Amino acid sequence: MAEVLVYVDHVDGAVRKPTLELLTLARRLGEPVAVALGAGAAQTAATLGEHGATRVLTSEASEYADYLVVPKVDALQAAVEAVSPAAVLVSSSAEGKEIAARLALRIGSGLITDAVDVEAGADGPVATQSVFAASFTTKSKVSKGVPVITVKPNSAPVEPAAGAGAVEELAVSFSEQASGTKVTSRTARESSGRPELTEAAIVVSGGRGVNGAENFALIEALADSLGAAVGASRAAVDAGWYPHSNQVGQTGKTVSPQLYIASGISGAIQHRAGMQTSKTIVAINKDEEAPIFELVDYGVVGDLFNVVPQLTEEVNTRKG
């Protein structure tokens, strides 16, 4: 059976959820071979093996932390040459898409980004994408070389499956460009205790209707009751009510959670482009003509200052 490379997103050996989703998709195409780079790479093997990885190619060179993405591209290129895979799957983070694009150029292959599904086709993997602000769904395949595909988080379930998870050292020769951009310092991001926005199963977002930074406490309270991440529309971010790192939309982050709750968000195309692939969408808005209601599964016409606290109370009551 053909092998499929999966680039592992991990932090000191702790594998992030999108990688486990990629392993589920990779098993549809062949035998998953994981590529784990950097400090703690070998520690990922147990988790990866539990989710179907037959082999884990590791390289813990300091270059992965000392420099930007080029060393990782070098390593993936070495893995492609060693394995001759049927496809390479990478998570659709900002870094992941840069790595994938550089890799596709290096190996002379086609690239598909932001897939929401991947399945086996008669002559290679077929990727499903949601395009033009989710107005259309397309199916695409790479016609040249080894397909390199980036997949949005939350596009596939995490399904445990027994795999050998055998650890093998990956021989990597770094290119001259690998040391071109050096990381000079790092600052740890302050943790909110909430899930990462792009990986969260539930996202609660607030927009212009929240009417002030202090009122985002209502959005945060609902999010915390659901174990959700907090998002914001561009209008709220531009007004200085919430950090840009939490912006959902065309100029922010793209999310695809199981549940998306939009509070006080009109539904401009800029915002819709970042959340339309959510599995279930709920909107709370006092304007019954708001464009957001055109794409929701459930809509509440009402004042968020009345609806959101009641919803938070009901969730907490049912939990308790």
Image: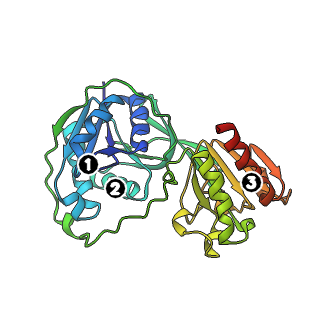
- Reading the image, the residue beneath label 2 is 99
Give the mark nearer the N terminus: 2 vs 3: 2
| Category of crowding for the residue at label 2, using alpha-carbon neighbours closer than 10 angstroms: few (below 14), some (14–19), many (at least 20) | many
In the image, which is nearer the foreground, mark 1 or mark 3? 3
Q: Is residue 116 above or below residue 39?
A: above
For the view shown, which residue lies furthest in the bottom direction? 239
Q: Position of residue 190 (x, y in %)?
A: 43, 64
Q: Could you tell me if residue 124 is visible in this image?
A: no
Which amino acid is tagged 3? Val
Q: Quadrant of the N terminus?
A: top left
| Category of crowding for the residue at label 1, using alpha-carbon neighbours closer than 10 angstroms: few (below 14), some (14–19), many (at least 20) | many
Q: Is residue 67 above or below residue 27?
A: below
Q: Regarding mark 2 in the picture, which secondary structure is present there?
A: helix
- Reading the image, the residue beneath label 1 is 76
Any mark on residue 86, and which? none
Which amino acid is tagged 1? Leu
Give the mark nearer the N terminus: 2 vs 1: 1
What is the distance, in whole Å, between disc 1 and disc 3 at their CAs?
A: 46 Å
Q: Quadrant of the C terminus?
A: top right
Q: Quadrant of residue 274?
A: bottom right
- Reading the image, the residue beneath label 3 is 308
**Residue drawn at x 77%, y 50% as measured from the top left:** 310
Q: Regarding mark 3 in the picture, which secondary structure is present there?
A: helix
- Between 6 and 61, the residue placed more toward the observer is 61
Q: Regarding mark 1 in the picture, which secondary structure is present there?
A: helix
**Residue drawn at x 60%, y 59% as measured from the top left:** 231
Asked whether disc 1 touches disc 3, contact meaning CB atoms under 8 Å apart, the reply is no
What is the distance, in whole Å, between disc 2 and disc 3 at their CAs?
A: 40 Å
